[in-house]
Amino acid sequence: MSETWTIKCLINEKPVEREVSVRLTLADFLRHEVGLTGTHLGCEHGVCGACTVLLDGRSARSCLTLAVQVDGMNVTTVEGLGDKTRLSPLQQAFMDEHGLQCGFCTPGMLTTLTELLANNPDPSESEVRLAISGNICRCTGYENIVKATMTAVRYIRDGMPESSEVVD
Amino acid sequence: MPSSWIGMKVKRVEDPALLTGEGQYIDDISRPGMLHAVAVRSPYAHARILGIDKSAALELPGVVAVVTHDDLPEQMKGQSIPMMVPHPVITADKRPQILCRDEVCFVGDLVAMVLAEDRYVAEDAVALVDVDYEELDCASWVKDAAEAGAPSAHADLATNIAANIDLEYGEIDHAFATASHVITEEIFQHRGSAHSMETRGCISEYDDATGQTRIWVTSQSPHQFKGAFADMMDLVDQDVHVIVPPDVGGGFGPKAVMWPEQFVIPACALIAGRPVKWIEDRREHFMCAYQERDQHWSGELALDAQGKILGLRARLIHDTGAYVPWGVVVPWITCTTVPGPYVIPAYEMRCEVVFTNKVPVTPVRGAGRPQAATFMERMLDIGADRVGIGRDEIRRRNFVQPEQMPYEVGLVFRDGKPVVYDSGDYPQCQAMVLEQANFAEFGQRQRQARSEGRYIGIGTASYIEATGLGPFEGVSVHVQRNGKVIVHTGAAPQGQGHQTMLAQVVADSLGCSFKDITVKVSDTTTIQRGVGTFASRITPNAAPSAHLASNTVREKILKIAAHLLETSVEDLEVEDSRVSVKGVPEHGKTFRDIATFAGAMPGFAVPAGLDAVLEDTVYFAPERATYANGAHCVEVEVDAETGHVSIIKYSTAHDCGTIINPLSVNAQVMGGVAHGIGNALFEWMRYDDHAQPVTMNFGEYLLPTAPEVPNVDQSHMQSPTPLNPLGAKGAGEGGTIPAIAAIVSAIESALEPFGVCIRTVPVTPDALLDLIDAGRQNAGRPDV
Ligand code: FES
Ligand code: FES
């Protein structure tokens, strides 16, 4: 039951080597063993998308992935997208368009949309909606998340606004 | 810098941390030596507990304890969670037990907690706890449960009636005797669970050194819980420290009410002598987080020949589940919200609140109001069709007019105060939304669509929302030695942006720089009292407190500045955390100068009339609830072959009085509408005949996702309430209240060729197909 296995992977560009229990989920590994609590668990059954991380750039449910499965992979979590003093264009756009309320679904939205924008730098609104159709948000009604993504497209294309004013 | 922060679209101070994974939610907190608790819950809807054998579980390495009723501290033995909102109409006061001793009354009722070094091990051990149950007959369907002789939801109760709510005013018999039209309808409404994306959770530790119990909990009402816990354990205030983590992932109702787990976990920490964490999983959230559920309505509406309402009579059977942990708040709100924005000269409401062996019913966003609005608006839609006038017109003919304000309805609200609409212009809100929706030209659009074989429809609904319930919500404002401002409140947020909203109010009233303000929420050691975040009550309660406390601190600052600048208070002005002499801006003192002077003269007296501490706390207490209002209009397309409903355009007009942050108000409306869409079309918590829950994951219970939720075209009126100094009303639930009614009406309008009348919500595709088929048969035109 407590069989372990050693894994080596890159997490947000940093090499990590750990011995993990073979039944440990990737989400629990990231949250409780690596201390990256930005990845959230909303359902633990693969539907809500809150736990979405990028594995070699592709989105995956960390609640349905075992830690041992990421051996040799490049894992990106919300913490790897930007930091408080240097938000990524997508994060900045979420702030500017009020794309979050409680913030619980937000990490999964950001990772999912980071993947979308990497593959499709100029998505339509309905492509954005489809891309996040596997991410449930109970607070926002999605409108501002879609708006924020369209704004992020502009930021990536034309550059971010110089200073982010407190007031819109 | 804006001249006034109130009314500005201020970006949220909460966001940077949340966007970078630095938020701090309950499961992100860890304590040294912490154990993990996993619950043993009843698999039966109704059963007697004959015995519990923990031995196999205790043998599992890593398991530390299995806590059952008999292990609880003496003060908790045989106890139920306290009744926070008692009401004389409650005839059978059944509340969830801290841990069930002899009887379990719904699937999910709490029997034991397994404590282990690791969550995985605790989950393994749950399967090894052997509880011997004797299954009892259960009350599954509320309509059956209400009948005499039905199986009882509780072994010691003769009937399942928890309460009768009987409300009336006016000459009801006369109204019906003189009516030109009487509309008689039976309507069934189901409303689902809250499903905040973060589930519930609790961590507790007992501090040997201070004798203090510390409890972190995802609560919407930490101070209420602290009081309840202290009372139960016979402790003084100082012995209990309740902290809501800085971030809570949504609430929507169930986190406002008390649950057994938040009492059991501190008990577990005491028993184990180590910190204990419990994080609910989603399956548990389906199984036992409080929900709303079933209501069976029968109603009669008396109309005169022109469609004016003469009277309304209704019977309601309300499923309250196994217990009444929050009293009868939901059905009471339902019964007092039915009249809505309309003049109803005579009203009679008979409501039976009935126990079933299901999850207890307590408020979910809207708290019984969406059902009230759906019932009333359905009756009006059907009434308009009968009288032969437009569905928009019947509403216009019955609105309370702005010149009738303040308008006394004739009912008593759940705060024990009369229902009085204090301000607003209901006809104007409707006019605004119809204009946005281009309602006038809908007929043309519909004809065009029909000629293409498409079925489109339009629906509108108006509503009022009681907001800002008392008794109070406190805010303290403190200018610290360095001139920066710290604000404390007990108003625990779950994503609404309280910090930003309160900072706006303080920046305006105090005259400080917005960036200098830090708002700290929900720690019971930082502010003495608090009530909680529910009933759209924080902006109308806490914002006035912030305003009044800031005013007092500003006066203190001005007095000291006048002393330092050797002038009078009248000659001073405050801006950007600095006081200066009017017309001589260079002659001034910063807040920092002033705070340092006030607080740092060891051995010297503070000059007479000046305060040493630049602080004030206010608990603003409104006289009674204030009423927000609005109107929605929605255009849908229905696929008559699949029953699929798509929303083409959604418009809202909303009036919550003074708006503090338009970004937040807009967002509350959008989120509320999305919740209403879920209630109208998707969300159904299903049970079988044995009261076994059958929708236990997000594949079986559907929440609206991005492709189903449209953008919302919003407009706002601002009719300030006279009941608080800022004129603000609440905005948290208005988006949800009329959504079901408007969507249902639009679906009916789309399916008019089939003569469809909708009497059951949510409206599922298969139910719609049945109605369409029946319509085809009736019309003798199976090919339509
Ligand atoms: S937590 Fe992984 S999909 Fe919901
Ligand atoms: S912001 Fe709360 S769930 Fe999306």
Image: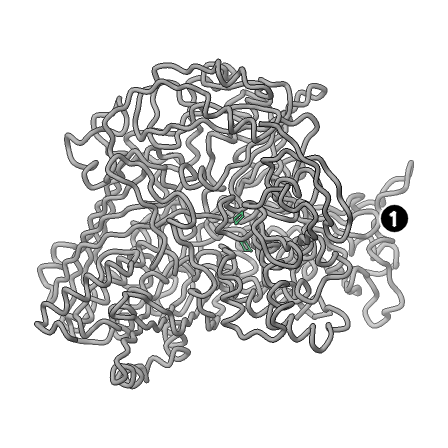
- Total number of numbered labels? 1
Look at the picture and state if B79 lies above or below A153. Answer: above
Instruction: Choose between B364 and B117: the one closer to the eye.
Output: B117
Instruction: Choose between B498 and B619: the one closer to the eye.
Output: B498
Look at the picture and state if A154 lies above or below B71. Answer: below
Query: Is the CB atom of the residue marked by disc 1 within 8 angstroms of ligand 2's nearest atom?
Result: no
Q: Quadrant of the C terminus of chain B?
A: bottom left
Q: Position of residue B433 (x, y in %)?
A: 40, 74
**Position of residue B183 in the picture relative to residue B566 (left or right):** left
Instruction: Choose between B581 and B436: the one closer to the eye.
Output: B436
Q: Quadrant of residue A1?
A: top right
Q: Quadrant of the N terminus of chain B?
A: bottom right
Q: Position of residue B635 (x, y in %)?
A: 35, 73
Give the residue drawn at x 44%, y 39%: B283
Give the residue drawn at x 38%, y 29%: B95
Residue of label 1: B597
Check the residue under mark 1 and report the chain it is in: B
Q: Residues within 10 Å of mark 1 (few under 14, many from 20)?
A: some
Q: Position of residue B540 (x, y in %)?
A: 53, 54
Instruction: Choose between B780 and B586: the one closer to the eye.
Output: B780
**Position of residue A67 in the picture relative to residue B630 (left or right):** right
Q: How is the image coloured?
A: one colour
Q: Quadrant of residue B457?
A: bottom left
Amino acid tagged 1? Phe
Q: Position of residue A48 (x, y in %)?
A: 50, 52
Q: Is residue B619 visible?
A: no
Look at the picture and state if B481 lies above or below B673. Answer: above
Give the residue drawn at x 65%, y 32%: A4
Element carrying mark 1 = helix
Give the residue drawn at x 28%, y 34%: B162
Q: Is residue A100 visible?
A: yes
